[in-house]
Image (cartoon, grey):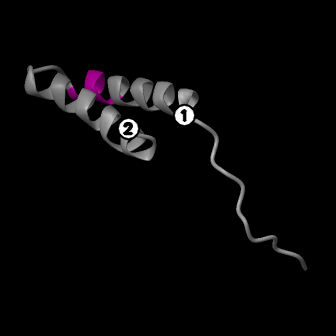
Amino acid sequence: MGHTAIVFAPAGDMLSVLSEGGPAGTAYGVHGATALAVAGTAAPAAPSPVAVTH
């Protein structure tokens, strides 16, 4: 699931609020809270295999 959840879960929750007639402010709040929860529980990204030196 990974990055797919980060993209679609928050948008789905936001659309659920709006489709039930909820106010836009609540939908944005739910969207933000869900995005933070998903990002906070996501696995850290793998380090880049290419080292950049200057």
Mark 2 touches mark 1? (CB < 8 Å): yes
Look at the numbered disc 2 and give the secondary structure of its residue.
helix
Residue 27 belongs to magenta span? yes
Crowd rating for badge 2 (residues with CA inside 10 Å; few <14, some 14–19, many 20+): some
Q: Viewed as shown, does residue 28 lie left or right of 3? A: left
Task: Choose between 50 and 52: the one closer to the eye.
Answer: 50
* Residue 40 location (% of width, % of height): 57, 28
The structure residue drawn at horizontal position 72% and vertical position 65%, both measured from the top left corner, is: 49
Span of residues in magenta: 24-28
Q: Which residue is mark 1?
A: 42
Viewer-proximal residue among 6 and 32:
6
The three-letter code of the residue at mark 1 reads: Ala
Q: Residue 36 at what x, y percent from top left?
A: 50, 29
User: Where 23 falls versus 46 (above or below)?
Assistant: above
- Residue tagged by mark 2? 5
Report if residue 32 lies within the magenta region: no
Instruction: Name above or below for residue 54 compared with residue 42.
Output: below
Give me the residue at 82% from left, 74% from top.
Answer: 52
Residue at the extreme right: 54
Q: Residue at x 19, y 23 (%)?
A: 17
Splitting the image into 4 quarters, where does residue 8 fall? Answer: top left
